[in-house]
Image (cartoon, coloured by chain):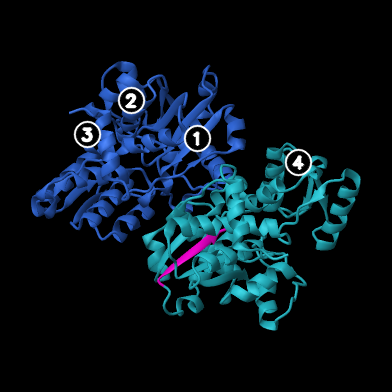
Chain colours: A blue, B cyan
């Protein structure tokens, strides 16, 4: 039930030409702020504006005939758009359960790919109950946003492209929500760069991963309080197991740090990054991270850019 | 004194590995708004945040020993940053004359590359006079932002990458300021896609190219009134000659259209584009352009992204 690097490599071949090979951007100004060389893997420039399209494409490509009855998921946004587009590309229906407070831009994205949306209350329980009802009605197959090895393997292809392009890195960092991107990043990095140090970035207002790793067992978020709307979910056993074995540490960042990082990314890389995606730069600029020795080069996985335009930092 | 495609091809080899190979982005939502397939060549993701680095790198690489006394230019911003970085990479000094009202982000960019800045009044006459005094003092060589065949050849490498990556396009469009990017785009496109239709985008508040082409001779801007701060300069004989022979027409856009286009690029492509760079999308969305027949695919050269953060459209 775990994920190994061969799964990532197979996913990369399977989704080649379907997912975008996203650029790696650099900025001397940001290097100078961080005190190191930074390499930004820009998944905000991925189709649907987020890495989620990698995992969804891989998982949906691997389904058999059952895909004909459609695909169902619940998501506040980027995974929803990813499933909607991947289902459309396979020529099957997508049924998406979204919390009624999901960002407008993400709702519109899902709609634009022709998926059927069912809104529910913004709780995990309501999402799961509503998705179950949709599947009962349609016979659709559920594709979980992160508790699925095929999804995790797909997410690992972002770090694969980054490392193939840039070569050795002393460290790599990705954001942690449910842990799918972080887990895929761990699997790839550990295989290709056994010596590299692996970090996670997590908002203080949804820090279940930091608390779970410290305790040695899963401690889900009870409530969340952060602008990082893509990182509100808690780890599952699959992702917790992978993170526990591979992460050196988790850097916790404040929403204020995240807004500063969003502005820096806009100014110096000319990219729009959603709060969740900016956590990695925020983390690298903390005193905690800057104090780490022997890290000259860092790969940062920018997870997505689907920001409601009215939320752009001023 | 003109530019041919062999110059562009030689420039591409010369600056390979120095300039970034920028991504070509697409969006189904923007395709649907335009009624055609759009391919955005994202020079906002170029080093220094603009295509200008291509031309400056080519021209400075082609200088002989005289480069040792430094490089001088005058520019409101992107060309200034480009010369500053290209000079630094060649290991020589850069002396940049900038109008005192240049965007803060562009002034900081020039400073960050170690160039010496001399401010002047925001008129062409003051810029030229100040640059002459700087060259008198230093012995530096002047690299003009567009009235230089080596600069034009460098700018043509953006369209070269676009066409090499995407293949045939029915049309291509670039912004017009002094005409360097547009001229390079014409030379490349005419050579590689002889049947393609070539358009320019120009703001109504600095429309010397449209007026000059209509009159058949150069009519420089007397005053300008537009947020497109990269497009305020007027054509020169070199660029006018190339545009006259190759452009089907110039699409004139309002500042309001430009702001709408900036927002669309932020929302759908997750990129920050400066007003000048957004003119091409604004043009493609006009009724005038939408009414054109037999254009299924369009390449759009997004010139740059160096936007003062406080100028982000809300």
Residue at far bottom of view: B215
Chain containing the residue with disc 3: A
The residue singled out by tag 1 in the image is A39
Residue marked by disc 2 = A191
Q: Closer to us: mark 4 or mark 2? A: 2
Which of the 4 quarters of the picture holds residue A269? top right
Q: Residues within 10 Å of mark 2 (few under 14, many from 20)?
A: some
Callout 4 touching callout 3 (CB < 8 Å):
no
Alpha carbons under labels 4 and 3: distance apart? 51 Å
* Front residue (pair A182, A210): A182
Mark 3: few/some/many CA within 10 Å (<14, 14-19, 20+): many
Residue ID at (40%, 69%): B36
Distance from the alpha carbon under mark 1 to that under mark 4 = 25 Å
Which residues make up the magenta segment? B296-303
In front: label 1 or label 2: 2
Q: Position of residue A148 (x, y in %)?
A: 21, 36
**Does residue A237 appear left or right of residue B260 in this picture?**
left
As drawn, B187 above or below B47: below
Separation (CA) of disc 4 from disc 2: 43 Å
Residue A203 visible in this rendered orientation of the protein: no
């Amino acid at each position: 039930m775990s994920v190994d690097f061969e799964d990532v490599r197979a996913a990369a071949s399977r989704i080649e030409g379907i997912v975008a090979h996203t650029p790696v951007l650099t900025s001397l100004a940001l290097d100078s702020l961080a005190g190191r060389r930074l390499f930004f893997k820009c998944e905000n420039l991925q189709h649907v504006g987020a890495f989620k399209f990698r995992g969804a494409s891989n998982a949906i490509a691997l389904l058999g005939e059952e895909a004909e009855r459609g695909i169902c998921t619940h998501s506040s946004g980027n995974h929803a758009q990813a499933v909607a587009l991947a289902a459309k590309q396979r020529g099957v229906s997508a049924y998406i359960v979204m919390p009624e407070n999901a960002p407008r831009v993400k709702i519109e994205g899902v709609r634009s790919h022709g998926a059927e949306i069912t809104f529910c209350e913004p709780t995990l329980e309501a999402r799961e109950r509503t998705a179950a009802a949709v599947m009962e009605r349609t016979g659709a197959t559920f594709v979980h946003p992160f508790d699925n090895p095929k999804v995790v393997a797909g997410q690992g292809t972002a770090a694969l492209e980054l490392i193939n392009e840039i070569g050795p890195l002393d460290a790599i960092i990705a954001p942690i929500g449910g842990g799918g991107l972080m887990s895929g990043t761990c699997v790839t990095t550990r295989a290709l760069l056994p010596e590299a140090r692996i970090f996670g970035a997590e908002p203080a207002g949804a820090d279940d991963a930091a608390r779970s790793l410290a305790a040695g067992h899963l401690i889900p978020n009870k409530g969340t309080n952060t602008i990082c709307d893509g990182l509100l979910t808690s780890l599952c056993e699959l992702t917790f197991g992978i993170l526990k074995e591979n992460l050196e540490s988790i850097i916790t960042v404040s929403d204020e740090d995240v807004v500063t990082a969003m502005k820096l990314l806009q100014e110096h890389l000319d990219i729009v990054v959603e709060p969740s995606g900016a956590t990695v730069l925020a983390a690298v600029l903390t005193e905690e991270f800057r104090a780490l020795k022997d890290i000259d080069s860092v790969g940062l996985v920018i997870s997505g850019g689907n920001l409601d335009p009215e939320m752009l930092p001023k």
